[in-house]
Image: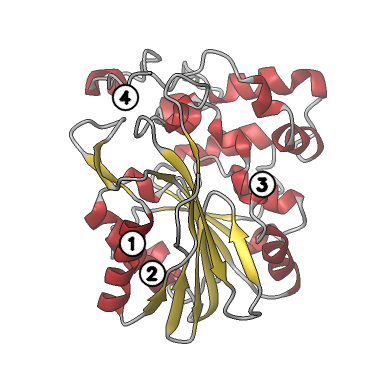
Amino acid sequence: MSDTVTLPSAEKIAERSTDVPWYEKTIPAEKLDGAARELLENYSKIPPSEVESHVYNIVRFPFTKECNKAWSVFPFPCIGGFRFLDLAIASSPYYPTLLSRLSTSDTKFLDLGCCVGQELRKLVHDGAPSEKLYGCDLRSEFYDVGYDLFKDKDTLKTTFLTADIFDEENEDLKKLEGDIDVVYAGSFLHLFGWDDQVKICKRLTKILKKEGSVVMGRQVGEVTAGERTHTVDTSRTLFVHNKESFERMWKEVGESTGTKVCCHHYHLLHLLHPSGSRTDLRLCSGGWSVRWSIQDLLTGERIKIRAGFCLQCSGSNSQIASGHLVR
């Protein structure tokens, strides 16, 4: 198996060409075998026989006036590989606690880089009040795709923000500062280089409440951390973490923000084969998916965040998961 992937040209990206490594011509069968199908059938009320064609027509090229196509908004790997159908947040052992918090308290949740809002719909379908949920993305067109995909524009009360996380003057994000209890950053940090990841994490410490707040997430990782060429924009680099680098990044964030950060239990789950079906994760050929586990500061209960990470704040102290490597 080759360790290299031929990266597409900027022109192909700009033209929304399907001639890129992460574009699946058909929906992989496993993407509609479980939670995604259940959500579309029972939340969106789409007849079982129409689910596959509905998803394909909504997210695929070409763009039409009747319906924004997700691929035409931006050809992210999560769109090309139908990875957005994984509903990854629900696989976290913290998920039941999150649902409980949203259902029984004034907890507010932000999905950072929410794309079409699939994780938000999963939360609502599982009982979370939609008015307690916020979604944020750089491209507002994804929100229209989400409304069409899930058929809930007239019922969903979630607040969607169009914002650049690096824009310190964005009024919508400034209004959220100190008001969010849980942030989910799924497949988000790994899109950026080291310096930008640090900036994002610093911004999250402003958005979060200071007591009992949590950051959840998931991303690509590698045994050997370092800069990699960005798949979608070859003029940029991204930073892929291992345990040591992730811990070091949060230490830097903590020192610059006055936040105490403790790191432990970082897990690399499985190899991502560039020749396999997980083409959406070819951000780094031969990379790994990542899991962190943490010690819950509020209950003392050890929890594991599958394919993700968790930062929990208690007063002026914060705790971020990291730790040892496992194969």
Mark 4 element type: loop
Q: Amino acid at mark 4?
A: Asp
- Mark 3 and mark 2 lie on one chain; the one further toward the N terminus is 3
Tell whether label 1 touches label 2 (CB within 8 Å).
yes
Judge depth for marks 3 and 4 and give the one in front: 4
Viewed as shown, does residue 327 lie left or right of 58? left
Judge depth for marks 2 and 4 and give the one in front: 4
Residue 185 appears in the picture as rendered? no
- Residue 16, placed above or below residue 255: above
Q: Which residue is mark 1?
A: 170
Q: Please state the horizontal and vertical placement of residue 52, each as a whole percent of the image.
A: 69, 20
Q: Which residue is mark 3?
A: 121
Q: Residue at x 60, y 19 (%)?
A: 27
- Mark 3 and mark 1 lie on one chain; the one further toward the N terminus is 3
Q: Which residue is mark 4?
A: 3
Viewed as shown, does residue 210 lie left or right of 126? left
Disc 3/disc 2 C-alpha distance (Å):
25 Å
